[in-house]
Image: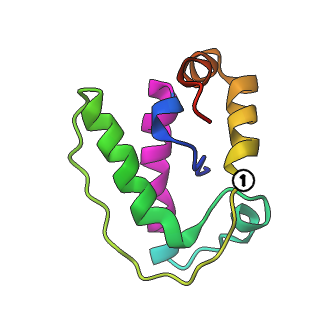
Amino acid sequence: MRMWMVDPKYLCRKHLLGEHQETHSFTGTLKKNISIQGYLRNGLLETHNLKKRHDSLAEEMLRRGYRHLSPLEELNLAPLGHINPSQNIEELKRRCPECRKRIEACHDF
């Protein structure tokens, strides 16, 4: 699981829908008090941005004509974790040809 924290328009369908699902998974993990230390240590989660990130992903899903039927509750979490979006753009370009095309087509990062 991870939060990419890059502009959702850069994400291919798989990564957009995957990160959306992961915001729900992280929320469930936090509600169950399961340790998130590995995600924090590895720069994969920002607890304080879960709701905001979910909503921006859902907005992009709707913009693309996908359905979104799963609102995310606000959890009032302490600000933990830091993600490097610039590093994640490079990782997405390396990993995913579809994301690379979307990123390179935007030219605004």
| Quarter of the rendering containing residue 61 | top left
| Quarter of the rendering containing residue 27 | bottom left
- Quarter of the image containing the C terminus? top right
Is the stretch drawn in magenta largely helix, strand or loop? helix
The residue under the point 75% across, 33% down is 90
Residue 16 percent location from the top left of the image = 46, 35
* Residue 15 magenta: yes
> Considering depth in this image, is 77 or 100 the residue closer to the camera?
100
71 left or right, relative to 7: left
Q: Extreme front residue here?
A: 108
Residue, disc 1: 84
The residue under the point 59% across, 25% down is 107
Amino acid type of the residue that numbered disc 1 sits on in the rendered structure:
Asn
Q: Is residue 12 above or below residue 43?
A: above
Q: Which residues are magenta?
A: 12-28
4 left or right, relative to 41: left
Residue 52 percent location from the top left of the image = 41, 62
> Considering depth in this image, is 61 or 23 the residue closer to the camera?
61
Q: Secondary structure at mark 1?
A: loop
> Considering depth in this image, is 70 or 32 the residue closer to the camera?
70
The residue under the point 73% across, 59% down is 43
The residue under the point 25% across, 36% down is 62
* Residues packed near mark 1 inside 10 Å, few (<14), some (14 to 19) or many (20 plus): few
